[in-house]
Amino acid sequence: MPAVRPGVRSVLALAAICALPIILYLPFLTEPFMRDEGLYASVAQLILDGGVPYRDAFDNKPPLIFGIYSFSFILFGENVWAPRLLAAICLSLTTLLVYFQGRLVFSHNGGVIAALAFALSIGIADFQTNANTEYFLVLPMVGALVAFTLARRTDGAAWYVLAGVLSGLAVMTKQVAIFNFLVLLAVPLITSVCDGGWTAVASRRVVRPLIVMVSGFSVALAAVVAPFVITGAFGEFIDGVVLYPLSYSGGLSLVDRLGHALWSPIFLMTRAGPWVILTMFGVLFVARDEGSPDRRVLVLWLAACGLGVASTGRFYDHYFVQLLPAMALLVPAGVYFLKHAWGSRWARVTAMWLLPLSAAIPLFITAAIYLQPTAEARHVAKYASGEGALEINSAELAAYVSAVTSEDDYIYNLGFQSEIYFYADRRAPTRFLFDHPFAADEKYEIEALGDLQNQPPLYIIDSAAYESDSLKAENYYPVRIKEFVDKNYDYLGRLYYADLYRLREPSASDG
């Protein structure tokens, strides 16, 4: 049998590494939707029926996540695994981009180490492996970084344009990617100041990349926003994507923000210990390596990812996914740091004892999720501390609602279990498919109440009565809507995690 050539072996090894995210994702393909996924799926379902996000379905996420879900349904059908499979494919492609970036900045071996580190990090199931925005966000983010690095190497305008376009797509997937784009814009300025002082800032080598990247960024934003301008939904788009997130991020007290910020390093260390340690060593290695400006960009890019995670002050588990490619790209530098310091006793102790010990807790937590016997059990293990554990019953609850309604009937979920709309394939009479906006501004609740009064839904599913959520103000409950429900609906009882109400039949005295 002829020997496999080294180049072929490298390609096969890289292909195997890129397949790892898909393999690690497979156990979660068919688990129930968590509530964020349920909202995206419900909006995507509405889009495929001719609806317009924000005008017909309010949310604070940019529109590309709804387009991604719609695309997955077109490709694979309207089911829970469609967006998950697309997310797994995107993560595989992201792994390939991490390799290219690692190869550009370090070497082929450095790229392989970075790609392997990222691919394995997808197995950190306690980051709530699912089809949330972060699992799609990392692809355009890393793509923009690769294009930017190639642009700096070749001084090619097309690469700068691509870096801007991909950055725009990343921001239209989740707003926090703006910090990474600002880093790319800042690098030419910082480099010029370091090389030639402030007088060099106005030079062509600085102005041209900025103009070209901003142009590409603007084109991407314009292309995404254009449908909302055309359909007359631009105002609703701005309200959802810009104004409401400001209320959302400002809803936490300073004490809560500090508490979450102090807890987040502990959480990250117990879930991704080896990556954290090697990233810290990688930062030290880059700080000592004065001959590689592209490596210093990785440190700034990591800081931008961290700022994105921290910007809302909430630090939900899946937010940390945004850090994974930045950490993976610094892992090779961490390995090089330990290799260069191998003569020191502390370096050998770190490699042989500290790194394996730091992997023990993450492996235990991850195994406790992966080894669950069913997809539903894995879902409960991932979301045991919140309402996510309730969602294993959403399909059954929705099946009941679907059975007692027709396609022309409206339903309304008072709470944040928007997956009910998707499972039941029913619509709400209001664009507010979840109640969190009501706590941020009473105008949203008043608008929703008006919609309910104009087109009363046949059934109301009140899960808010049983939710305790930090997104809402303390002890908040939409009282106006509950008064409307009590006045016009008959209480049927509790079904799973929600109180069920049916529209009251008009009495003879009413007529």
Image: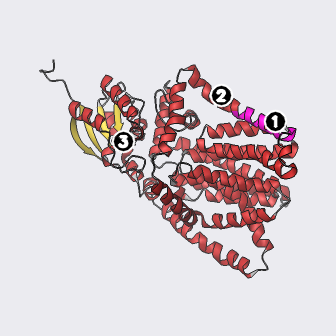
- Estimate how packed mark 1 is, as few (under 14), some (14 to 19) or many (20 or more) residues with alpha carbons within 10 Å: some
Q: Does residue 4 appear to the left or right of 443 in the view shown?
A: right
Q: Position of residue 339 (x, y in %)?
A: 78, 72
Is residue 403 placed above or below 335 in the rendered structure?
above
Task: Say which residue appears at 33% left-offset and 42% top-offset.
Answer: 397
Sequence-first disc among 3 and 1: 1
Residue 232 seen anywhere in this rendered image of the structure = yes
Sequence-first disc among 3 and 2: 2
Q: CA distance from mark 3 to mark 1?
A: 47 Å
Q: CA distance from mark 3 to mark 2?
A: 33 Å
Residue 406 seen anywhere in this rendered image of the structure = no
Q: Position of residue 405 (x, y in %)?
A: 31, 30
> The N terminus is located in which quarter?
bottom right
Residue flagged by tag 2: what amino acid is it?
Ala
Is residue 264 placed above or below 455 in the rendered structure?
below
- The answer to if 60 sits in the magenta stretch is no
Q: CA distance from mark 2 to mark 1?
A: 18 Å
Q: Which residue is mark 1?
A: 158
Stretch in magenta: 202-217
Task: Provide the major secondary structure of the magenta segment.
Answer: helix
Residue flagged by tag 3: what amino acid is it?
Gly
Residue flagged by tag 1: what amino acid is it?
Ala
Q: Which residue is mark 3?
A: 415
